[in-house]
Amino acid sequence: MLANKKKSRPSARLSQGAFIGSLLCLWSVLAVGVEVRPFQGDEITGNNVLALWQFQPGAELADSKGAAALELCGRSQVAPDSTFGGALECFEFVPGNDKPNGARAARATAPVVDGAFSIEAWVKLKETPDNPDWSTGYIVDKMYVPNTHERANLNKDYHFSLRHNKAAKKVTLQAGIGLGTEVINFSSEAVDYAPGVWRLLAFYYNGAGTGMFFVDGRLVGKKTHADKGPVAAGSLPIMLGERCGSVHSGLPGYLAQVRMVKGLPSQIKLINLELQHPFQRNVFERMEEGHALQLSVSNLAEQKITGLALTIHDGLAGREQLLGDLPANGEPVVLSLPLPCDGKVGAYTYRVDARAVNADGQAVTGGAVFDYQLCRRLPEFMPVVMWGGASIDKLLSTGFTHGLHWMDHLDGAAWSAGQPLEYQE
């Protein structure tokens, strides 16, 4: 058999096996829920809480702040729930039945929004909705028309909804803010969503053109409209789990603890970390060299944070890195973090945790993970085998890497000698 000709190994070459592995092993965040922690303490009673609907037994339709009691619409009902005590069951729009569902609070009792505010809700989509092809489901609506309208009175208030992509099994969080003269819109990235799982969804508007979306505390979208102001108060009632008018677009799921607050939502990571490979790889050959992950660090607290420190564990070893201070509303800090490929074959998690202190002396945190695999080193090329005879130079020049030769002419000599033959030049 002919020996392989040795070739140099490119340090960052993506082999065929590693490339296929990358495609098969791409991981997506937010595919399943995290630990569910209902609102508690100051999240319920704090002065920043504008309204909170909890659907609790004995006070199913009450606003915990005492102002905006609900009335049920259509088929919606308050159902018992083992996690929250109670939840509002909502229903999606079914063609041919344009009737409201969800729950409504009168215009006069709806919370007054001024400046920065958040809408957040625990949401669980149904596994078998009546209309599997539903496209939009409202979480909260006080706007009716979600885009700029020629009638100025319709360009007011706000909405928070989900856009459903059935084929991709994803949802997009959407929101609109009515400024009086126009409506500005916001959308998140597409999010994997498992029905039957409680997720904490939130939308934040800073009162000056910037909106952010969060799923289970993680930032999934941010957009700024320059030179915009606060919400303009409108005259419509507030709807939960439904649109304010036809065509109705109810949510095919359950709502628990729907909350409106001044400022930022709760249970969010105010230090936003994004950790990824620049070429979207997550499978590497052992001993590849020159790889690094890109870490983006953003301050979402809207106030300066100090003493920012990172704890970095690359799957093999850990270390600390100090970044110092991050101003409010500044550009993200981007770091390059080496990715070692000298571990054993297997799966690894690269984890970065951040901690700092805000201007009020409170701890703020953030985190990100990157899952990757190390696979065994593969041959430089597929063997090309010649079954026949030719000189070594001829075989190599033709493109063969190996040759098979049947040495039957030695059978008789070995039989006559009665033993294995000695090597001869």
Image (cartoon, helix red, strand yellow):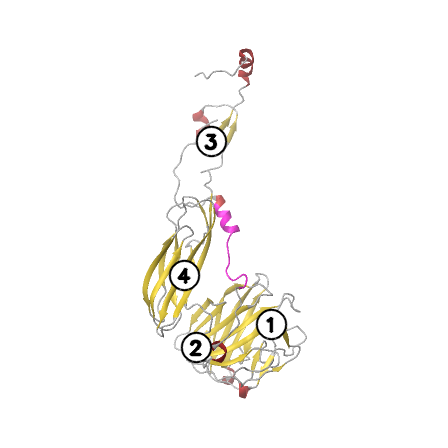
Proximity of marks 2 and 1: CB atoms separated by less than 8 Å: no
* Circle 4/circle 1 CB separation < 8 Å: no
Counting residues from the start of the chain, the first of labels 4 and 2 encountered is 2
Q: Amino acid at mark 4?
A: Asp
User: Mark 1: which amino acid?
Assistant: Tyr
* Most foreground residue, 306 or 415: 306
Q: Are marks 3 and 1 in contact (CB under 8 Å)?
A: no
- Mark 4 or 1: the one toward you: 4
CA–CA distance between discs 4 and 1? Answer: 33 Å
> Which of disc 3 and disc 2 is earlier in sequence?
2
Provide the residue designation for mark 3.
401
Q: Is residue 200 above or below residue 73?
A: above
The region drawn magenta spans 18-33
* Label 1 sits on residue: 254
- Please indicate, yes or no, whether residue 45 appears anywhere in the rendered image: yes
Circle 3 or circle 1, nearest the eye: 1
Left or right of residue 133: residue 231: left
Dot 3 falls on a residue whose secondary structure is loop
Kind of residue at badge 2? Gly
Residue 27 highlighted magenta (yes or no): yes
Give the Cα separation between the discs numbered 2 and 3: 68 Å
- Give the distance between the C-alpha atoms of the residues marked 4 and 2, in whole angstroms: 25 Å
| C-alpha separation, residue under disc 3 versus residue under disc 1 | 64 Å
Q: Which residue is mark 4?
A: 353
Location of the C terminus by quadrant is: top left
Q: Which mark is residue 263?
A: 2
Query: Residue 75 at what x, y percent from top left?
Result: 66, 77
Identify the mark nearer the N-term, 3 or 1. 1
